[in-house]
Amino acid sequence: QVQLVESGGGLVQAGDSLRLSCAASGRTFSDYAMGWFRQAPGKEREFVAVAMWGVGSTYYADSAKGRFTISRDSAKNTVYLQMNSLKPEDTAVYYCAAGRPAYGSQTQHLAYNYWGQGTQVTVSS
């Protein structure tokens, strides 16, 4: 059974940092893209970052560029999201996702097959 389990969320102040982790099990994901999405109350799920398979190209939402860094450890079947300079508008439930989106679709949540249960990130001002 495939599982994605996120950890590392919490309550922090604006300007602080957090590192989210997503541990995958049930299969190897070295040939899958692994990414992060987030959903704030009353809003749609939105793309944050993704690390593709193969050479591992990375893509970021404009809101994440320069502040967030995605990385993956294929040996551990784990993907990380380092978040620096957090802002109150980063408050959301963060979801880990895995899939094989076509290039050009890597920001679309419907392109991902596997999802974690989410971890809450709350940034106070």
Image (cartoon, rainbow, N blue to C red):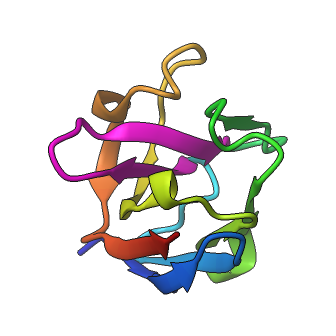
- The x, y position of residue 86, in whole percent, is 64, 64
- The x, y position of residue 33, in whole percent, is 57, 45
Q: Residue at x 48, y 35 (%)?
A: 100
Quick check: can you spot residue 4?
Answer: no
- Does the magenta run of residues contain 84? no
Image height of 68 relative to 118, above or below: above
Q: Residue furthest left?
A: 42
Q: Nearer the viewer, residue 70 or 120?
A: 120
Say whether residue 94 is left or right of residue 35. left
Say whether residue 62 is left or right of residue 122. right
Q: Residue at x 78, y 44 (%)?
A: 56
Q: Residue at x 49, y 28 (%)?
A: 107
- The x, y position of residue 59, in whole percent, is 70, 34
Q: Quadrant of residue 74?
A: bottom right
Quick check: can you spot residue 90?
Answer: yes
Image height of 11 relative to 39, above or below: below
Q: Nearer the viewer, residue 23 or 31?
A: 23
Q: Nearer the viewer, residue 49 or 11?
A: 11
Q: Quadrant of the N terminus?
A: bottom left
Say whether residue 82 is left or right of residue 38. right
- Main SS class of the magenta portion in the image: strand
